[in-house]
Image (cartoon, helix red, strand yellow):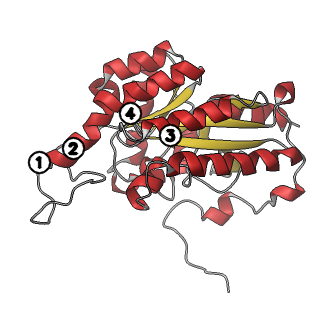
Amino acid sequence: MTDTKRPPVGLLPTERIAYSPISERKPLRLPGGARMVVWCIVNLEEWDALQPMPRTVLTPPAGGAPSPDIPNWAWHEYGNRVGFWRMLKVFDEFKVPATLAINGSAIAAYPQIVTAANERKWEFIGHGFTQRNMQKVDDERADIRRTREVITQACGKPPRGWLGPGLTETWETPDLLVEEGYDYVCDWVLDDQPVWLKTRSKPILNVPYTQECNDVAMMLIQHHPASEYFERARDQFEQIYEDSADGARVMALVQHPYIIGAPHRLKYFRQIIELISARKDVLFWTGGQIADWYMRETKT
């Protein structure tokens, strides 16, 4: 039976995208005979000390949500003060471009990180103005627009992509993103190739992201040892590489400086980048490069 309940505004997920088995699609081809693309998304966030912390490493001894929550705020801040700079050495060593999913408020909070990313010509994509669920934002359009404005000021060009904090969206998010000038979104983790989403105006492209090869899921939710990052990413890479014999695929690797940049985890990030970099038929691209390629490849 079809559920006749409707969201207050916007479209149902099944109205934004039709089912499409990957086995029935025309094979996609990458330039230079490459088989697949890997893109690295670094999530750069600012946590508001006046608000409950988005994630925690320590439970307060007396329970509740203390304010200020110094242990958990400092745990995250370590990533931006130290962890990011560890990660940067890996990106530099293997000459891998990253995509920086950044809170709009983090632009002013961490100017040296912004400078480092600009110097390396990383792509900046919106990640909400503050690190909170988009359902809790008072004015979503204003949040999306403000994030775009501060990134444009920091980079000299507007962001093309968007990643919701925690992959959160409202019923209107894809519609608002298109109307505010974004070309692609990463929240719909449902494919190994880019796919088009319907909006109330023109379509928006969804570039494959990952919940599986994501340090938040592995380390903070599933509580795996640090080595899981390498092992799972290796296994996922090998399978997608095999799948790509039938047409190009996209694999995402997600990093948060306070998680994968921790001293006991960083070496596993380096190991997977080293392993993938050894494959000459695999490309490291940014989200914008993936979007441009897919639009060219599928243009009719």
Q: Earlier in the sequence, mark 4 or mark 1?
A: 1
Q: Which residue is mark 3?
A: 268
Residue behind mark 1:
68
Mark 4 near mark 2, Cβ–Cβ under 8 Å? Answer: no
Is the C-beta separation of discs 2 and 1 under 8 Å? Answer: yes
The location of residue 15, given as percent across then percent down, is 67, 63
Residue 61 is left or right of residue 243, and the answer is left
Secondary structure of residue under mark 2: helix
Structural crowding at the residue carrying mark 1, measured as other residues with C-alpha within 10 Å and reported as few (<14), some (14–19) or many (≥20)? some
Q: Quadrant of the N terminus?
A: bottom right
Q: Tell me if 289 is positioned left or right of 103 in this view.
A: right
Please tell me whether residue 16 is drawn above or below residue 49 in the rendered image. Answer: below
Q: Amino acid at mark 1?
A: Pro
Report whether 193 appears left or right of 121. Answer: right
Snapshot quadrant of residue 22 = bottom right
Residue 29 placement (x, y as % from top left)? 86, 36
- How packed mark 3 is, by other alpha carbons closer than 10 Å (few <14, some 14-19, many 20 or more), is some
Gap between marks 2 and 3, in whole Å?
Answer: 25 Å
The residue identified by callout 4 is: 146
Query: How far is mark 3 from mark 1, CA to CA?
Result: 33 Å
Check the image and report above or below for 260 versus 110: below
Determine the residue positioned at 66% across, 82% down: 2
The answer to whether 73 appears left or right of 281 in the picture is: left
Among the 4 quarters of the image, the one containing residue 299? top right
Q: Report the residue at 66% width, 50% height from top.
A: 236
Counting from the top left corner in percent of width and height, residue 144 is at 43, 39
